[in-house]
Amino acid sequence: MSTKYDLVKYTLRGLFLICSFLTFFILLFFYFPEQWFYYSVVNRLHPAFISEADWDNIYMSVLCVLALMINGLTVIASQWLLKK
């Protein structure tokens, strides 16, 4: 049986994970300029025309994946440090 304490603990953990993901996403969005990414990566690898909708999908997908990876590594590292 789960107690109220466990329920609060899991809820706070979930809120922390959501807040940390949003923080990493906002930081990446702020410090990872769209124009730099377009000119340095996409221009070299995909010289054909990319529509605005496709570009937005690519850029946001890259930011989401990077934020998820950083968030996952942060969670793994924090759990490892807490158990140590």
Image (cartoon, rainbow, N blue to C red):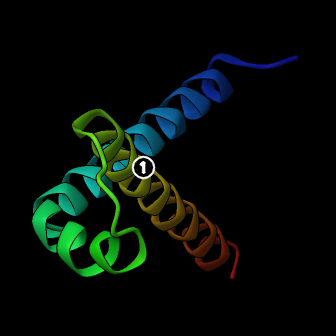
Local crowd size for mark 1, using a 10 Å CA cut-off: few (<14), some (14–19), many (≥20): some
Residue drawn 73% across the image and 19% down it? 3
Q: Mark 1 points at which residue?
A: 64
For residue 8, what is the image quadrant?
A: top right
Q: Left or right of 54: which side holds 10?
A: right
Residue 18, horizontal then vertical, whole percent: 42, 38
Comparing 56 with 3, the one in front is 56
Relative horizontal placement of residue 62, taking residue 59 as reference (left or right): right
Image point (57%, 34%), residue name: 9
Q: Which of 30 and 21 is in front in this view?
A: 30
Tell me the quarter of the image containing the N terminus: top right
- Tally the numbered discs: 1
Q: In this view, does 2 lie above or below 44?
A: above
Please tell me whether mark 1 sits on a helix, a strand or a loop. Answer: helix
Task: Left or right? Give the position of 52 relative to 84.
Answer: left
- Residue at 59% from the left image edge and 79% from the top image edge: 81
Residue 77, compared with residue 24, is above or below; it is below
Residue type, label 1: Cys
Locate the C terminus and report the quarter of the image it occupies.
bottom right
Q: What residue occupies the far right of the structure in this picture?
A: 1
Q: Quadrant of residue 28?
A: bottom left
- Choose between 37 and 13: the one closer to the eye: 37
Left or right side of 4 for 44: left
Please state the horizontal and vertical placement of residue 71, each as a whole percent of the image.
48, 59
Q: Which residue is drawn at 57% across and 61% down?
A: 72
